[in-house]
Amino acid sequence: MENGHAKNRVAVIGSGNWGSVASRLIASNTAKLPSFHDEVRMWVFEEILPTGKKLSESINQANENCKYLPGIKLGANVIADPDLENAVKDANMLVFVTPHQFVEGICKKLVGKLRPGAEAISLIKGMEIAVEKFSEATIGYKKDKEVATRWAKLFTTPYFLVEDIEGVEFCGTLKNVVAIAAGLVDGLDMGNNTKAAIMRIGLREMRAFSKLLFPSVRDSTFFESCGVADLITTCLGGRNRRVAEAFARNGGKRSFDDLEAEMLHGQKLQGVSTAKEVYEVLTYRGWQELFPLLSTVHEICIGQLPPTSISSLVLCLETSSRVSTLLFDDIFFFLLLALLALLEMR
Ligand SMILES: NC(=O)C1=CN([C@@H]2O[C@H](COP(=O)(O)OP(=O)(O)OC[C@H]3O[C@@H](n4cnc5c(N)ncnc54)[C@H](O)[C@@H]3O)[C@@H](O)[C@H]2O)C=CC1
Ligand SMILES: O=C(CO)COP(=O)(O)O
């Protein structure tokens, strides 16, 4: 498209906290880049505000998402559109940025509605771009570096590209489960050393889980912005951490759903549902014992274990550490993979 005759057109699918930040950032770039149309269509899941006004109308009038990103102007070229089909129909570059539980339904609605040759990116990992503090992002891509570079133009903060799409996806997905564990530790006042241990073990389990499922996943991806940097950010300050802290302080008596609704005002947690999805894989593959942190978080989230079980987990860290060390020694790791493959074949 860029080297052809028409300009690129961008639609952002999602308008929550990060969706609004991304739209703002992208719109500031499309306004400057001659190869892009200025306008950025932002699909809004329509909501009625307490004032009785529609969220999409309020965004277009105030040029601000008063519910999910109050106080920040989005840019005059961001147009909120509650009609999904209309929002995407002219776009050749789609930016998906909704909570993952809604993606499937959205994609079903998009079948047959997109421009031929349209490309899409799934946005992962957190930045503080809305207030223009330093931030970085990692774009995972497969083979076509030209496409990845075109996408990178939309995000002018310092970035780098990683050709490890599964690794990048797993980093962004699994760190939310580790953030729940970090929040539990905070809620139980277990201190910073314990939280650091959770982050260390969490990173190891993230890497081991990803590599067992996709042997092509690269170790180095976990040391990019999408890996260790995002893990630290989310464990120090994120929503998953915050709600998990409240869950532990309430002794597990109030559900995550309740606390999410009360504390986040419409924003969504990813860690609890991700923990469930990961647990299903661990159970299916018989890997629970290899991943004590990922397993325990889910069992705590569903009330099968009390929040204090995170402390027993910490006591077992030495053991899990030994398992992880084994996992990441190259020779042993590949032997283990071969053994697991043999066991699965039986
Ligand atoms: N906030 C952050 O710092 C970051 C978020 N992300 C990812 O971006 C994605 C979107 O997150 P946020 O923009 O923060 O969302 P959010 O949690 O701030 O807001 C929730 C969004 O979901 C919408 N929604 C509610 N019910 C819906 C439904 N039935 N169908 C479709 N949409 C519905 C709401 O209208 C709202 O736009 C998530 O996958 C998140 O993991 C990634 C990096 C950073
Ligand atoms: O990256 C995010 C969602 O995937 C943000 O999560 P937290 O706000 O919990 O850090």
Image (cartoon, rainbow, N blue to C red):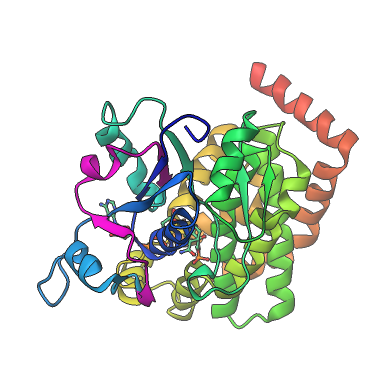
Image coords of residue 323 (percent x, y): 79, 48
Q: Is residue 7 magenta?
A: no
Q: Is residue 85 magenta?
A: yes
Image coords of residue 293 (percent x, y): 63, 56
Give the residue at x 66% y 16%.
345
Q: Is residue 314 left or right of residue 273?
A: right
**Which span is picked out in magenta?**
70-95
Asked whether residue 170 is in view, the answer is yes
Asked whether residue 304 is in view, the answer is no
Image coords of residue 139 (percent x, y): 61, 46
Q: Choose top left, top right, bottom left or bottom right for residue 119.
A: top left
Q: Choose top left, top right, bottom left or bottom right for residue 155.
A: bottom right
Give the residue at x 25% y 74%.
62
Give the residue at x 68% y 37%.
163
- Name of the residue lying farthest toward the top: 346
> In the rendered image of this protein, does residue 240 appear above or below residue 346?
below
Closer to the camera, 249 or 330? 330
Q: Is residue 225 left or right of residue 173?
A: right
Where the C terminus falls, by quadrant? top right
> In the rendered image of this protein, does residue 333 appear above or below residue 230?
above
Q: Is residue 51 left or right of residue 157?
A: left
Image coords of residue 208 (percent x, y): 71, 44
Q: Choose top left, top right, bottom left or bottom right for residue 181.
A: bottom right
Closer to the camera, 208 or 40? 40
Q: How many marks?
A: 0
> In the rendered image of this protein, does residue 243 appear above or below residue 335?
below
Closer to the camera, 130 or 262? 130
